[in-house]
């Protein structure tokens, strides 16, 4: 097919944006605006911001000499054809600000620049995605619907200078291979679902990193002191994660995060006083026990009755009132729809006498046991601030999302979240705790908390002499008790009706929790980054108690709210042992 015929495939879909800039079949292609040639062969197409509407024809894959393709700021739809992605000489592709969708294709090894930001791409990056992209300098898939883990093969793209994965659904831990990217200067992973600690190799004294944006994830551990030794580092944002400890002292200097803050506090300062250093540390993250709208200065102390053990706390601190925390658990798991939770929130029934709640002699909650109760929603992060909680059993429900990192704050002896629809990975800090007997007589293992994705056991864990066995083709949940999709059956005895209820679901599709849309968005440029924040209003959609239930047995006889711990049957699977 001739070059003019290939390019005309665009004109056939939406002629005005292109004919208005001189795309004319009666004029040589090399004279068309936005088309560049080497001799009479097309080697670059740039129609950035022309208002085109349509799809990218697979016939473009016949333009064997094409090195540059810029389709940014249009209204392209559909996929990027594999024929185009594999053009042998293609070095730069930019489709920013369109509505491309589907999986990101595997690009030719010739690519130096892949910019796909602000589209609708989804799916995950295959484990070998970067293995043949040794020439790649820029990789930007920000503001899409990408998910899955960041593959270790990213270390194969040794020329990478700019990586932007921000504002997606990437999960899992940061690959250790990031430490091998010695040319990496700009690294943005903010606003994802990433967990775990910062790889040691990423924070190296000889690193070339200039900007590192990690905010709004679920990262934990401490901030590596080596960040303070990186001589090129200018911007480091770590807020709205679960980092503990303090900001390393060597990061508390006036040349870090300068573009977003007033320099007048440091004018004329030749040496740091303690006050100067503390103020500068807040440019990186608010200290533990303090918060701000964006987790960085200006910071203020947590209000009375609230706390935070994390640096860079965003929005507000956590309540330490156990009644507030229990109410949040109830609301986050659709409490009005629970099976047998009939003593919750009726007049005359205190928290310590709710079904499934046990308190110590001082009235502090030590056990929450709500198995097979039809809990739906996510596990509230607030639970991590019930400082006396030793047993948490939420097994055999319909919970989605992830295990909150905050649970690692608890003095837990037993944790059972098996038989739900939770996604991994398990917070690494939780795996290092003596929960469920983890670490007794052997190494610490995350399987003691829940079988990982792709495995299962009869208990959903690797305890009781069992092991988590491989399980291919099953939904990607942790804590699975059966390998294949199955239907849960719950027995819900009611004293007023005596009726049984069977609830069934087929585990065929991974449940994805739509977390509250990110509290702020930062936009940046290599020269003069600009931080923009937006705040959401409350959506007011918390589940309220059902008025119909207020006329049940407890309103007639409040003394009946003193109910023992639930002892109705779960699935036919062994119980986890009690570790007291």
Image (cartoon, grey):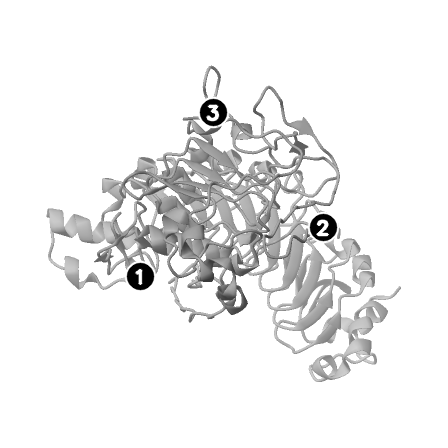
Q: Residues within 10 Å of mark 3 (few under 14, many from 20)?
A: many
Q: What count of labels does the image hold?
A: 3
Q: Nearer the viewer, residue 136 or 570?
A: 570
Q: Residues within 10 Å of mark 2 (few under 14, many from 20)?
A: few
Vertical comparison of 339 with 4: above or below:
above
Vertical comparison of 339 with 60: above or below:
above
| Residue 213, visible in the rendered structure | no
Extreme-top residue of the structure: 441
Residue 45 location (% of width, % of height): 69, 66
Residue at x 66% of width, y 32% of height: 455
Q: Which residue is mark 1?
A: 259
Q: Is residue 87 left or right of residue 329?
A: right
Q: Which residue is mark 3?
A: 438
Residue at x 41% of width, y 56% of height: 558
| Residue 375, visible in the rendered structure | yes
Q: Which mark is residue 504?
A: 2
């Amino acid at each position: 097919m001739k070059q003019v015929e290939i390019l005309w495939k665009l004109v056939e879909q939406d002629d005005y944006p292109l004919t208005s800039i001189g795309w004319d079949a009666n004029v040589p292609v090399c004279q068309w605006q936005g088309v560049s040639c080497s001799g009479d062969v097309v080697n670059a197409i740039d129609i950035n911001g022309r208002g085109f509407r349509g799809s990218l024809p697979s016939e473009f894959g016949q333009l064997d000499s094409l090195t540059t393709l810029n389709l940014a700021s249009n209204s392209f739809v559909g996929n990027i054809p594999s024929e185009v992605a594999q053009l042998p000489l293609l070095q730069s592709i930019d489709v920013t600000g369109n509505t491309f969708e589907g999986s990101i294709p595997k690009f030719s090894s010739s690519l130096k620049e892949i910019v796909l930001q602000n589209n609708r791409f989804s799916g995950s990056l295959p484990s070998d995605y970067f293995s043949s992209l040794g020439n790649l300098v820029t990789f930007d898939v920000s503001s899409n619907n990408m998910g899955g883990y960041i593959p270790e093969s990213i270390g194969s793209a040794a020329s990478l200078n700019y990586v932007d994965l921000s504002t997606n659904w990437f999960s899992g831990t940061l690959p250790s291979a990031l430490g091998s990217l010695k040319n990496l200067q700009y690294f943005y992973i903010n606003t994802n679902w990433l967990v775990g600690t910062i790889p040691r190799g990423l924070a190296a004294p000889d690193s070339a990193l200039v900007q590192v944006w990690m905010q709004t994830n679920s990262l934990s551990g401490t901030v590596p002191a080596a960040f303070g030794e990186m001589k090129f580092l200018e911007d480091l944002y770590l807020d709205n994660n679960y980092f503990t400890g303090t900001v390393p002292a060597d990061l508390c200097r006036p040349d870090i995060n300068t573009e977003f803050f007033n320099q007048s506090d440091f004018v004329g300062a030749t040496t740091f006083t303690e006050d100067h250093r503390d103020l500068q540390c807040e440019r990186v993250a608010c200290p533990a026990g303090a918060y701000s709208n964006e987790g960085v200065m200006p910071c203020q102390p947590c209000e009375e009755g609230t706390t935070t053990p994390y640096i860079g706390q965003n929005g507000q601190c956590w309540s330490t009132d156990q009644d507030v925390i229990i109410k949040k658990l109830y609301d986050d798991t659709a409490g009005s729809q629970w099976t047998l939770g009939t003593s919750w929130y009726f007049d005359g029934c205190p928290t310590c006498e709710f079904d499934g709640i046990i308190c110590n002699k001082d009235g502090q909650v030590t056990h929450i046991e709500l198995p097979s109760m039809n809990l739906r929603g996510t596990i509230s992060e607030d639970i991590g601030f019930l400082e006396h909680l030793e047993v948490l059993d939420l097994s055999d429900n319909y919970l989605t999302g992830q295990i909150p990192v905050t649970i690692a704050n608890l003095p837990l002896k037993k944790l059972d979240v098996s038989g739900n629809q939770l996604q991994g990975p398990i917070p690494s800090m939780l795996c290092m705790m003596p929960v469920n007997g983890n670490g007794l007589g052997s190494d610490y293992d995350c399987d003691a908390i829940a079988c990982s994705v792709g495995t299962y056991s009869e208990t959903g864990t690797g305890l009781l002499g069992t092991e988590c066995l491989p399980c291919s083709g099953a939904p990607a949940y942790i804590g699975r008790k059966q390998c294949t999709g199955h239907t849960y059956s719950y027995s819900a005895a009611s004293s007023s009706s005596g009726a049984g209820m069977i609830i069934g679901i087929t585990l065929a599709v991974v449940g994805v929790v739509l977390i509250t849309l990110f509290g702020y968005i930062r936009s940046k440029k290599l020269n003069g980054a600009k931080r923009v924040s937006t705040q959401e209003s409350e959506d007011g959609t918390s589940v309220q108690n059902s008025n119909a239930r207020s006329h049940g047995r407890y309103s007639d006889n409040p003394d009946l709210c003193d109910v023992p711990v639930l002892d109705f049957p779960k699935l036919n699977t062994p119980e986890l042992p009690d570790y007291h």
